[in-house]
Amino acid sequence: MAKNRIIVGLSGASGIIYGIRLLEAARGLGLETDLIMTDIAAKMIEIETDMSPDEVTALATRVHDSFDFTSPLASGGFSHAGMVVVPCSMKTLAGVACGFADNLLLRAADCALKEHRPLVLVPRETPLSSIHLKNMLIVAEAGAVILPASPGFYHRPRDIQGLADHVVGKVLDVLSIEHHLYRRWREGEGGDQP
């Protein structure tokens, strides 16, 4: 297994900052990233950030067209340390839950599940309907990790990046990747990492 390679899927949900921050952190940690970005994710970059989609794709090691089923990511034989869908839209969650792999992002997630590789889905939707919750249960029972974009505050974040770093750090924890994105909980202490 390629321990220094992760797949990053950006789907069309609010919270695109989390996916961008994951790409930045992965680059800083020397990880290879294979990026799949949906068309709506590209629109969310323009809506929610001052970056362009091209600037975001430049953060990845490799970029794959979201409808290219000839990509190596469409094969269960593609070696990687895990896949993260961040943010994960409810449409993408539903596709994973139903095994409806009509784009490369969903196919790569399907492969991660069937090959028993880590799959982390980072939903930001709120509130959640019973349909959303049932889909989350389905994918969790299939082996995925549901990691809501719910940052903690015990590390006393000073800005939006501090909040994003907490969520991205939790994603890296699930993948067993060492990082220093936030100060870990220690009783009686708080404050951002120096």
Image (cartoon, rainbow, N blue to C red):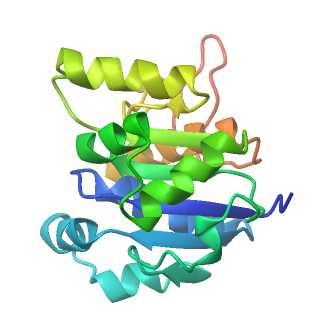
Q: Residue at x 43, y 27 (%)?
A: 152
Residue situated in front as seen by the camera: 154 or 17: 17
Residue 37 spot, x, y in % from top left? 38, 70
Instruction: Count how many numbered circles sit on residues in the image.
Output: 0
Q: Residue at x 52, y 61 (%)?
A: 8
Find the residue positioned furthest to the top.
187
Q: Residue at x 28, y 79 (%)?
A: 51
Q: Is residue 33 visible?
A: yes
Residue situated in front as seen by the camera: 28 or 187: 28
Q: Is residue 182 visible?
A: no
Q: Quadrant of residue 71?
A: bottom right
Quadrant of image for the N terminus: bottom right
On screen, residue 114 above or below 44 = above
Q: Quadrant of residue 74?
A: bottom right
Q: Residue at x 59, y 62 (%)?
A: 7
Q: Quadrant of residue 113?
A: top right
On screen, residue 50 above or below 11 = below
Residue 33 located left or right of residue 93:
right
Residue 121 spot, x, y in % from top left? 46, 40
On screen, residue 47 above or below 141 = below
Residue 160 spot, x, y in % from top left? 32, 50
